[in-house]
Amino acid sequence: MNLDGQIDVSVARMSWENSISKIGSLVDNAELTKPKVQALADRVAGYFVPAIITISLTVFVIWIIVGIYAYKKRGSDAAVAAISYAIATLIVSCPCAIGLAVPMVIVIASGVSAKHGVIFRAPSAIETTKDVTHVVVDKTGTLTEGKMSVIADTYMLKPTVEIWTHLLGLVSGQKHPVAAAVAEYLYARGLHEYTEYDTTKVIVGGGIEGKLNGEAIVVRAGNIDWLGVASSRQVRSFTNRITSPPTPSIESPIYQHSLDYTLFGVTVNDELCALFALRDVLRPETAAVISALHHRNITISVVSGDDSRSVEHCARVLNIPPSYALSRCSPADKANYVSELQSADPKAIVLFLGDGTNDAVAITQATIGVSIASGTDIAKSAADVVFARPDLRGLLVAMDVSARAVRRVRFNFAWAAVYNLFAVLLAAGAFEWVKTGAGQGASLKIPPAFAGLGEIVSVCPVVLIAFSLRFARFRRNGGVGDQ
């Protein structure tokens, strides 16, 4: 308790300037600039009713004139006939076929995709996913299983146990794959005691910072670039050791995965005291999915906060050009890269696939944002599409469902247009001069008593075409076929 003294407080940043708030702000800004798909069906249906009323009034006026001057009828008889044609025109026209053309297919497509583990949170994504031109993918936890393991470590300060306890106090309970892997490694060494810090702070895209005794001891653990030790002699020595085993024939885990590792450092008061090398493995389906995307002429980019060696190795294994492999990316860097792709080609449809909180901004910025089941809540809430299962083949299913759904929507629009065109012409008496032969004086037209059947005739094909999507067979290797 301070009664007489003076307390000086220095504010480094305001409460709303923390990393989570910045990510939230970036998500909001990206949401405002995200293109919206126009609702064509709603606009057409909105003009349909006034147009039909206008046409019916026009039909009424025309048939009064024709009845009086062409058929020499009395005014009352001509008016009765004109009303009959006008009413038939009103009844036979069907905006339902247009109104149901999109929502019926969207509902069925959503259910079919959900059965295959793909949840379309934004209906507009069903329309645009088939036209994807660029796929930008996060590496750790998305292309890879996100289950990293420590393959080597080295320590610059002694005692080692003290470093372990400091480190475990930072990484224990963390969900990031790298921090979780280091914690698991320390637990496997039999370590259970850890330092309890006065304050700890997670730096998104960087690492974790803990302070003891006020600010007398500051322990940081995370990305070697964030720690400022990437070019240090200790890092170079450690890198040479794990990439150059004494005997090339030695088949150690380090040697086998020498180019696919992530470096994790620990500093105490800015002095490097430990380094860890970790590796991850690709998901079993990753190579096949990336190959299928290449065959569809889709440009693929890998973005990650990991070091360049790990990202470049991943890209090389998946036949992705080095220029499309971006490393050491912050959340803003990922969003900016997506924005650059969109600016370079206004017609580009950019899909971003990620799983972490640091991917949320890019997921929102992309034309189509996708997250997987194992992703964080923030990533999934920002996504237009969510995979219910941690399986990248859901991306191919989403594209195929989109293509099939849009094809059916187009058919429904075409059918609705053709039906209404010919039904209105028939009801309006445009083919009055065509004799059917059904009886003396019988002509080709639709009486008002039967005009109501047009509702069934127009809507049934729309419903049947939409339901046919339920019988489509989607192969998770990228193929699709109808049974």
Image: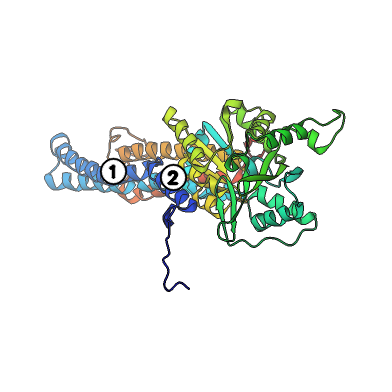
Q: Who is closer to the viewer here, 365 or 414? A: 365
Graded by Cα atoms within 10 Å as few (under 14), some (14 to 19) or many (20 or more), the crowding at tag 1 reads few
- Could you tell me the amino acid type at mark 1? Tyr
Q: Who is closer to the viewer here, 117 or 166? A: 166
Q: Who is closer to the viewer here, 406 or 200? A: 200
Is 33 displayed left or right of 291 in the figure?
A: left
Q: Is residue 135 visible?
A: yes
Q: Secondary structure at mark 1?
A: helix
x, y percent for residue 323: 57, 26
Is 338 displayed left or right of 275 in the figure?
A: left
Q: In which quadrant of the rendered image does the C terminus lie? A: top right
Q: Residue furthest front?
A: 4
Which label sits on residue 102?
Answer: 2
x, y percent for residue 385: 53, 46
- Which residue is the site of mark 1? 47
Q: Secondary structure at mark 2?
A: loop
Is 344 displayed left or right of 398 in the figure?
A: left
x, y percent for residue 250: 87, 32
